[in-house]
Amino acid sequence: MLIYVEYITERLLYTLSFVFKDRKVAYQLTNDGIAFIAASGPKLNYSEREFADCLQIVPARLLFEDECLQKKPIPGAFFGTACLEFDQTADLLASIFYVLSRMEEYNSPQTDGLGRYKASASILQHQNWLQTPICDIWSNSLISYLEKSLQISLSAQPPRFYFQPTFDIDHTFAYAHKNSIRTFFANAKDLIYRRSERINDRKKVRSGALPDPYDTFEQIAELAQHFEETKVFWLLGNYSKLDKNLSHLNLAQQEKIKQIAAVCEIGLHASSLTQHQPQQIEIEMQRLAQIVGYQPNSNRQHFLLFNLPFTYQQLIKAGVTHDYTMGYAEQTGFRAGTARAFKWFDLQKNEVTSLTVHPFVYMDGTLLEYLQLSPTDAKARIQALYKEVQKYGGAFSFLWHNETISGYQHWESYQSVFKENFLINQANN
């Protein structure tokens, strides 16, 4: 298929690659009108210029500009497919680029108390598209429209589906291996809030009478041996209000990191300090490298703290090539409109970058603490998300913590929810 455009831009190339190249659809792009007229075979005119006897799609200007939109697009429809409309032009390709590039997040004031972009602010949430991989749905709709209009088969290949458990290690231990000062203040706080169970458990763990409830690393290691795409992200930042893990120098913590590194990839769980101190990313990366014996190249931001384009630009400078932060804390679903890994497009520089973004579809705390779903409702949500990813391709990637899979305290009722991921996958393989 030959596609004519008046201008070949980075935005256009990026979007066409997501729609066609990733599905192994053969196409060529030209801005030579004479060559386009002379060519035989299936042709698409994606421009305002008119050609005789040729399928034409009039584009929105978004893919041919350098700036970010100052206002959000409105809902529209492209031959029956609900999408986005830009300047009175409904355009599937522009819709895909707008969502995939996360344009709506740039300089947005709609953030929560931690400075994170709100799911409730996204046009995907407003249009009830957040729980579906809308960019892949739009891609398939465009391919179907072209096949029907041109009366050809583009032989599109479905993107690969894979299963990916991921774990964040915010607190390696609940009570063990913490110094006397931290233990004293933790006991004092539990006493004030009358949490006698925690006080008793802390005493038993520190005396060796009870295993630490957060020490679920044997379970994580066993899962990693069965699922090769498993990823674990470890917090090694300086102690702060939001970062309370043990020091990277703690030998017990180092032992656990090495245990997991022997069976799966360990990435950095970049601390909250990296949002305001970019050099901190490299410091924490070096800490992890010294423990695991290799230079890590993957990351997930602690508390999912990231702001575009700043955070991703700093990750690239620090040598990070894979980031797993793309998801919401407050809501499940497809923040970037896909479950597939994709290259980040820097709208500030208007170019494709070396950073591969790996979305996840839900986090444990989202189900229990934000949405307050019962175990039954949480399982139903997981099943629905699994079916969407299985249908359209990409990673069924989900986020739990070593502490939450333990079933300790209020997580007890969610043990069956965690197991549901693996039961679904087993039933479908």
Image (cartoon, rainbow, N blue to C red):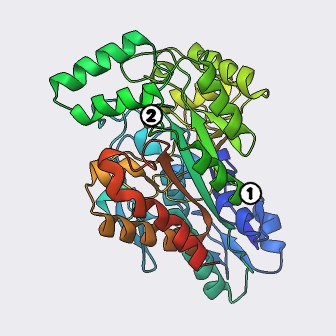
Instruction: Give the residue type that dot 1 points to.
Output: Asn
Quadrant where the C terminus sits is bottom right
Looking at the image, residue 323 lies above or below residue 311: below
Quadrant where the N terminus sits is bottom right
Closer to the observer: label 2 or label 1?
2
State which quadrant residue 152 falls in. bottom right
Q: Which residue is mark 2?
A: 209
For the residues labelled 2 and 1, say whether their Cβ atoms are less than 8 Å apart: no
Q: Earlier in the sequence, mark 2 or mark 1?
A: 1
Q: Which residue is mark 1?
A: 31
Where's residue 105, x and y in %?
41, 40
Where's residue 299, x and y in %?
61, 35
Lateral position of residue 352 relative to residue 326, left or right: right
Mark 2 closeness class: few <14, some 14–19, many ≥20 residues within 10 Å: few
State which quadrant residue 124 falls in. bottom left
Where's residue 227, x and y in %?
68, 59
Lateral position of residue 210 relative to residue 411, left or right: right
Where's residue 29, x and y in %?
76, 61
Looking at the image, residue 120 lies above or below residue 275: below
Q: Is residue 357 or residue 191 the one in the foreground?
A: 191
Looking at the image, residue 292 lies above or below residue 382: above
